[in-house]
Image (tube, rainbow, N blue to C red):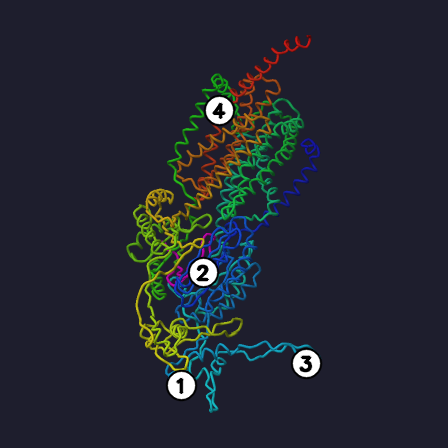
Amino acid sequence: MIAKLIKYQKITLLFFVVLVLLGTFSFLSLSQRENPEITVSMATVKTIYPGASPEKVEQLVTKPLEEKIREMESIKSIDSTSSTNVSFITVEMQAGADNKRAWDTLRQKVQSAQDKLPAEAHQPEINDDLAKTSAQIIHMVVENPSELESLRPISETWKDQLRTVAGVSDVEIVGLPDQEVKVILNKEKLESLQLPWTLVMQALTTAHDRTPIGNVTANNNNAYVQLTGEWKSAKDIADTVVYRPAGQGNSLSIKDVAEVKVGPQKTEEEVFYNGKPAIDVVIYPAKGENIPSLQVGIDAKVSELQAQLPSHVTMVSLFTQKENVDHLFADLSREMLIGMGAVLVVCILGLTFGTSIIVALAIPVSIALGFLPISMTSIDLNQISIVALVIVLGILVDDAIVVNDNIERRLSLGDSPLDASLKGSQEVSISILTATIATAAAFFPLFFLKGNIGDFIKPIPVVVSLTLAASMAMSLTIIPIFRKWSSERSLRKGVSAQNKLPGLLGKPLWHLSEYYEKLIRRLLRKPLLTGMIGLVIGTASYGLLPLLGVQYFPSAERSEFLLDVKMPVSADYKQTADMMKSLSVWAAKQDGVQSVSTYAGRTAPKFYYAENASAGTRTGQLYVKVDESRIHTSKLVADWREQLKRIYPDIELLPRELEQGPPVGAPIAVRISGPDLSELTSLSNQVQTILKSIPGTSNVSDSVGDKTFTMDLQLDQEKARYYGVTEKDLSGTARLATDGIEVSKLQLGNENIPVTLFSEANQMPSNETIGELLVPSQSGQLYPIKQFINVQFDRMITSVQHRNLVRTITVRAYTDGTLPSDIVTELQDQVGKLQKPNAYTIEFAGENADRNDAFSSIGKLSIVVICLIFIIIAIQFYSLSIPFLVMMTVYLAMGGALIGLFVTGAPIGFMALMGFVSLAGIVVRNGIVLVEFIEDARHHGMELYDAIAESGRARLRPILMTSATAIGGLLPMAIMGGSLWRPMAVVIISGLIVSTLLTLIIVPAFYLRLALWRDNRKLKRNKAATTNLPAQGKTTSL
């Protein structure tokens, strides 16, 4: 096959050129984004139950929904939080489940459970699109809060216009309350008319309560009959008739007993930019969209809209994903180009300049060829796929170097250019094929990692495997063709390839080969001692393992960070907003702060794949941009952590950097599950006490928090029955004074806005104002609420959590720079000593659990990797002993990698494990090629010692060069790469250095012992067979 491809060289080259052009086009056409798209196998179910306590929400809403949801198949977990007015359930599916089908089933289950929910509960809202991350966040800033309402029509225009941009899936407005129609009752008029508010509500509720009429025949046509006359404005609502008094001509309308106006709903979310009021326009991309291309369209539309902004509105682009994509690609491209330069330099040191260029062509050609099939997969250009290219950068020239070196060797033996190209490529084709398959086998099992971590790392095995296959194809075809041409050209010029030492270091490498051969011949006199010394040196490095830290993923090292704020349970929204304003003023004065975006009542919209937006009246967040020319983000975060503890000791404040990898939440989490809330709270307090006593922990809290104050309206049942007052009317009357009662909808423009009924005291009411409210009796009489209730103040829990339908409290903690694994080790020891009832369980979650799951998966896949490589080598050499010999290089490489991690101070994290897996596939190449040459020499009749020494000498230069190119390709990442990729580069580089040095000594030594043992065993078998021959002959003759 190779001979035909070389023979028909022009057709071969034309074929490759076409494929390279198609691959280049495919590469340039791929979507670009910051991180791989992660399939979030989670959905949420949110149900509003107005006025209900957490325990009432738990019993009447959460439990019925959970009971139906757990009937679904392939569920991993069901987590729920029942708090005042709200049930929030999170459903997570097992990795590999059909999410689309699962969410359809979820909707069916929720719908079937609705008849078990209270009539007052709103329809459950299901959200299964939790992965969407914004492409851009734009601030619209004004000077005064009173000007925010002027942004409503502007924001609606922007929302509608931006949705027309190709590639935009959704646009969200944050910080501007929705509108509602407020119907504010006049207490004095209701009292003078003795009019129950329930009649007003009934009038509003039934105003559009119509029975479908049906169809009629009109003008020989079938016509659908519909009754028109819906509300068109607030005036129409005000004109709605409540009732017509008997014997009077005038009817009583809503406007006679209430004020009707359109306005914003109660503010519970606000946005500020550098202390000024603002709103956010959040733009979300469609799935798989090319971010840079999308941003061009967004920028054009934003420029057009910005020109129409009034003078009092300032537009600020808070965040664009494109900026991060450009920065990321610039850094990785720089590292890749430097790596390519390093590879080229290494080639020039060992090869002629012309040959170096030919060999270096393997990099762009292999990448172009590899991305032709990659473009047909779901892989796009992101930091993981680019890093995969950096990993494979130095390996792509390995095959080309091996083929070229063997062609060079054939030329030095006097072969013609054609024979040298044919024989040189054919002789190493099997070893190259085996080495390529073995390397791809090391990466390919990563493709089967499940869950978020599988989605995150998926580009690495795909990119590495396909580009390696392309490199092999090019090395066995294009390289021999080019070498044939260049050699023929040299001959025409009268330049002989014999005795010529190529490369700037040709002569030193030749002398090194001479010295290495002499060294090996001496060491082979005592092969077992030589091998054992090398093995002991490699094994000793494993003693460093306990000294290395363990980490899942490091911080993202970006010039931005977040400050999470959680107010005490007694705080209302106004206190939260005041605190956020205070923090914003303080933050803006700190050194190194470029800008501060403040969110009160919620967190920032999702701008990073590992973050999730949340909301709550006690929740707030600062999004801080840092001027890293003045101070590093990590230093600023550490400084703030200490300062904020002193300034705001009673507020839960957490400055934190963005994290790499799949989202895990708090790095330390302990779940305590059981039936009784008081016992759970007791155990939670004990765990929190333990955590706070361990150095390095910060922001220790649990998912329940302190109890909140309650005002219990204790009903006098006997008096209520006597006067004909129901609990429903009492609670409804009280609700008029707090959040109001939604009674209908008004179509206003493109929106359906709620019509809400309020009492006159529609601000934050007191116990006195609630007592004065008038509750109607069944006879129509009005009575003050205080006649039927006794006000008592108490405390209650703020929420009830479930984990898989069991009550659960989660204790969470963060660290101040200490590795979470170090804290969890001590925590587990102390928590294990706690006394707890049998019905209660304690399990560790957070980063520790996620890391253990991921590491366990990698460990299992590593076994598969070792087995695959073993089988591949066994098939090539038809031996079960040689694979053990080659796999020894992996063992030595792992030890070298541990040395590298120890010296650089890097922990063992997920990407370091990726380095170990990659290393296994890379180092076996040298062992395979070396052993294959020894076996081939013996097959051609060379004596054992000579075969080992001569093969070692012949393979020294390509082994050193392939190792050097792999190291050179990764060196920029090890020096300049971020904390995510540096450990992986260090693992591969240090493992390659140690493995290469020890492999050149240990493999020949142990091969000799193995060969002598095999030869002796063969001799014994032959001798035994020869001894038995005469006896057999004698028997036969008899």
Residue 700 locus on image (x, y percent): 34, 52
Q: Is residue 710 above or below residue 667?
A: below
Query: How many residues crowd mark 3 within 10 Å: few (<14), some (14–19), many (20+)?
Result: few
Question: What residue sits right under mark 1 in the picture?
Answer: 193
Looking at the rendered structure, the kind of residue marked 4 is Ile
Q: Write down the quadrant of residue 398 in the picture.
A: top right
Which of the pair 721/302 is nearer the observer?
721
Q: Nearer the viewer, mark 1 or mark 4?
A: 1
The image position of residue 579, as x and y in percent, is 34, 62
Kind of residue at disc 3: Ala
Query: Earlier along the polypeptide chain: callout 1 or callout 2?
Result: 2
Distance from label 4 to label 2 (Cα)? 65 Å
The residue closer to the viewer here, 493 or 831, is: 831
**Location of mark 4 (residue):** 1002
- Front: mark 1 or 2: 2
Q: Which residue is mark 3?
A: 218
Up-down relation of residue 604 to residue 544 (above or below): below
**Which circle's residue, 3 or 1, is located before the other in the chain?**
1
Q: Position of residue 809 (x, y in %)?
A: 38, 54
Q: Is residue 407 left or right of residue 279?
A: right
Q: Tell me how far mark 1 sits from mark 2, CA to CA.
A: 42 Å
Secondary structure found at label 1? helix
Q: Secondary structure at mark 4?
A: helix
Kindly check if marks 3 and 1 are in contact, taking CB atoms under 8 A apart as contact.
Answer: no
- For residue 393, which numbered disc appears in the image? none
Q: Which mark is residue 62?
A: 2
